Image (spheres, helix red, strand yellow):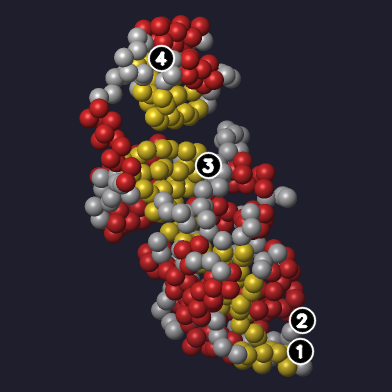
Amino acid sequence: MLKVSGQDQIGLTAILSQILADSKVTLLDIGQSVIHDQVSLGMLVQLPEGADNADLLKELLYQAHQRNIHLRFTAVSDESYADWVAQQGKDRFVLTLLARRISAEHLAHVSRAVSEQGLNIQYITRLTGRVSQSVDLKNDKACIELTLRGKPQSMDELRKRFLKISSELDVDVGFQADTVYLRNRRLVCFDMDSTLIEAEVIDELAKAAGVGEQVAQITNEAMEGRLDFQQSFRQRVALLKGLDESVLADIAQNLPITEGAERLIRTLKANGYKTAILSGGFSYFGKYLQDKLSIDYVFANELHIVDGVVTGEVRGDIVDGAMKATLLKRLAQQEGIQLEQTIAVGDGANDLPMLSEAGLGIAFRAKSIVKENAKHSISTLGLDGVLYFLGFRDQDIHSEAFL
């Protein structure tokens, strides 16, 4: 094992590898990282059998001295090497840590949780850009990705631990099996209200109709899962009877787009993803967002309007939780992809069916019942936090999102 550390400098790897090449050395493994301006390079090499390697080692040490770097050699036994090779069949997982700023406390709690479950950290990578000390914390974002090897002793216990860490330390923890699908998702389905937009449209319509408090109370109970969605939805729509159609346009033009939504969708589109809105809200507003954000598909409820006045009824079948899951599967089939390649993002109890069906289901700034039952959640960052769950780096996002 050859380990190099010190001031990062151009050409260092080229010089050292050429010295090894001149001595016919076989390269078995290699890893390099740069933190701030310090490089750490490791090479696992096999020296030619029977050769006198004294000149090789002297040349390596001379070059290290010339460049003011530290170089260390460690012998690796055949038994140790064989054990290392045997571990390549172990399960691998990716842990994504998201917060406005990541602290040592965050990493300490998460790394302790995985080690107690028998998982070993292999790599740690920063996905977000370099942090300026002058950046406003409110708009900041930080993400590191850990690659883990091993098999958790209890996936349920590990997940509970992550939920506890998230709630106590204001950090999001994503934990996924590192499979071929991890970086090969192709379809992202979004809830609309309180996900793509920071509002519940039906509540805004209700305020305009003078029944805001009544509808907001029903909406809250439905999203928490305490009321049947279809029944509660019809109740709320009935209270809108008599509302003038012109109100819809005013509300649509003032919809507050969720932080990070535009950045997320631009990046997804630039990288060939298909996007969809699967909403228990209204198609009028879904189509407005479709045009504004360039979304591929929209499925939502059609508010019945006659002579410019809301009738208090809905046309056709209601898009509830079960329908969202069905639509997700239908779109996957239509796009010719596996369910493992789909992503679903939502905040309410009626989103849980599609979150559980998708290859990656994310509860976004969700109600407590949704966070407890979804496999992944984002509460600390904006909607573009989804990109880090897909392994995007900020440098990829900046270069691709504006094509």
In this rendering, which labeled residue sits more in front, label 3 or label 4?
4
Q: CA distance from mark 4 to mark 2?
A: 73 Å
What residue is drawn where x is 28% and y is 50%?
151
Q: Give SS at disc 1.
A: loop
In this rendering, which labeled residue sits more in front, label 1 or label 3?
3
Ranked by sequence position, the earlier of labels 4 and 1 is: 4
Instruction: Assess whether mark 1 and mark 2 are in contact (beta carbons under 8 angstroms).
Output: yes
Q: Give SS at disc 3.
A: loop
Report x, y in % for residue 40.
45, 24
- Packing grade of label 1 (10 A; few <14, some 14-19, many >=20) is few
Ranked by sequence position, the earlier of labels 2 and 3 is: 3
Q: CA distance from mark 1 to mark 3?
A: 50 Å
Amino acid residing under circle 1? Gly
Report x, y in % for residue 258.
61, 60
In this rendering, which labeled residue sits more in front, label 4 or label 1?
4
In this view, the residue in front, 390 or 217, is 390
Q: On screen, 372 above or below 173?
A: below
Residue named by callout 2: 246
Amino acid residing under circle 2? Ser
Report x, y in % for residue 384.
58, 54
Q: On screen, 246 above or below 338?
A: below
Residue named by callout 4: 71
Residue named by callout 3: 127
The quadrant holding residue 75 is top left
Residue named by callout 1: 308
